[in-house]
């Protein structure tokens, strides 16, 4: 097994940035799939006994539903125009601060928050909390040149009137693209040590670099540092499709290249497969977005590490409430 020093490279979180056809031929790629579009949505799951949500599970997406997001670093708001009542949500930082990616605990009702408490207020259909006990997590947030909100991905948990009351959990997305990393490691897999883990922007910094020949995706968060390298066979360019018979990059000779490593662990030799669902590049040729799934086996062993990369492209995974 290969041992590595843990990486300390500063990474940059993305703020902007499928169906695939499996192929039998090693290293061949299918035509690129449709480009992922930014998503604006509002959804929640309400426990039985929750006053605001009344035990419902509802989900709305623009443009089918009128959803308006507004605000700045001092607080953001969303209004969903449905029926006669509609739904609204507000997230606010502690007074005097600005919102940023991260987790906000011990939230109080936004308009009446005290001290260093963040603010949260979700209401709808003419129902709201007098007192809020909650928390929220911001996975992505950005503002335009004027300071107005231009992108948001966040989750929340709200309880009315008591810290033990039934919960309302939800997800807010405004012009958002997927940004996450997940892996599942079989028992006996050296790299993942038999664990399963998911990373999002509230806890983790992601980075994507490279060109059409080779890209590197980096993950730093939750006490982990991971790196995923994907390379096309020599002379080819990475595109949407399935690449079989992958070998350890950069020693992959004429095969596709793959290397998932981290936390001081790496394979000396490996075999694997990766599927690129979507990949996009900037005008200068550098990679801009990637949606890919990989499977890696170290040293010819049966146990596998399976991982999913979503960086400004691909499908949304299930959201975990704050």
Image (spheres, grey):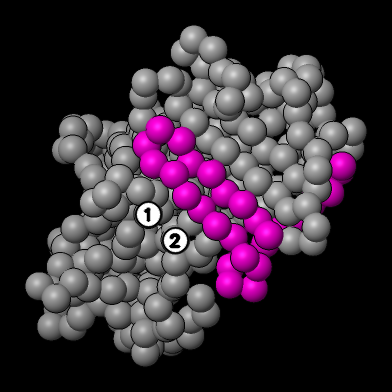
Query: Which residue is the site of mark 2?
Result: 175
**Residue lying at the far right of the rendered structure:** 49
Q: In the image, residue 64 lies at what x, y percent?
A: 64, 73
> What number of labels is visible?
2
What's the CA distance linking mark 1 and mark 2? 7 Å
Residue drawn at point x = 78 percent, y = 17 percent: 162
Disc 1 residue crowd, few under 14, some 14–19, many 20+, Cα 10 Å = some
Whether 17 is among the magenta residues is no
56 on left or right of 248: right
Q: Which mark is residue 150?
A: 1
Query: Magenta region's main secondary structure?
Result: strand
Residue drawn at point x = 73 percent, y = 53 percent: 86
Q: Which of the two discs, 1 and 2, labels the residue nearer the N terminus?
A: 1
Marks 1 and 2 close (CB-CB < 8 Å): yes
Instruction: Say whether residue 261 is visible.
Output: no
Segment tinted magenta in the rendering? 53-81
128 on left or right of 182: right
């Amino acid at each position: 097994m290969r041992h590595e020093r843990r990486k300390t490279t500063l990474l940059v979180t993305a703020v902007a940035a499928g169906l695939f056809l499996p192929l039998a031929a090693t290293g061949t790629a299918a035509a690129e799939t449709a480009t992922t579009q930014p998503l604006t949505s509002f959804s929640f799951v309400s426990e039985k006994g929750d006053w605001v949500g009344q035990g419902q599970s509802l989900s709305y997406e623009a443009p089918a539903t009128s959803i308006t997001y507004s605000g700045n670093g001092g607080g953001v708001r969303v209004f969903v125009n449905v029926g006669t009542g509609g739904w609204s949500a507000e997230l606010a930082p502690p007074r005097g601060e600005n919102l940023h990616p991260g987790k906000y605990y011990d939230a109080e009702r936004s308009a009446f928050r005290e001290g260093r408490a963040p603010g949260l207020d979700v209401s709808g259909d003419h129902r709201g909390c007098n007192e809020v006990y909650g928390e929220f997590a911001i996975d992505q947030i950005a503002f335009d040149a004027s300071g107005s909100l231009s992108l948001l991905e966040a989750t929340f948990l709200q309880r009315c009137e008591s810290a033990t009351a039934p919960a309302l959990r939800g997800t807010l997305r405004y012009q958002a693209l997927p940004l996450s990393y997940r892996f599942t490691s079989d028992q006996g897999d050296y790299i993942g040590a038999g664990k399963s883990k998911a990373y999002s922007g509230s806890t983790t910094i992601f980075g994507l670099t490279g060109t059409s020949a080779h890209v590197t995706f980096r993950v730093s968060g939750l006490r982990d540092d991971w790196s995923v390298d994907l390379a096309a066979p020599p002379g080819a360019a990475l595109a949407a499709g399935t690449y079989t018979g992958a070998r350890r990059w950069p020693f992959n000779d004429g095969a596709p290249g793959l290397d998932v490593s981290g936390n001081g662990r790496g394979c000396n030799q490996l075999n694997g497969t990766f599927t690129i669902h979507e990949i996009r590049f900037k005008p200068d040729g550098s990679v801009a977005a990637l949606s890919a799934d990989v499977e890696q086996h170290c040293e010819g062993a049966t146990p596998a590490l399976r991982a999913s990369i979503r960086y400004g492209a691909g499908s949304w995974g299930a959201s975990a409430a704050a």
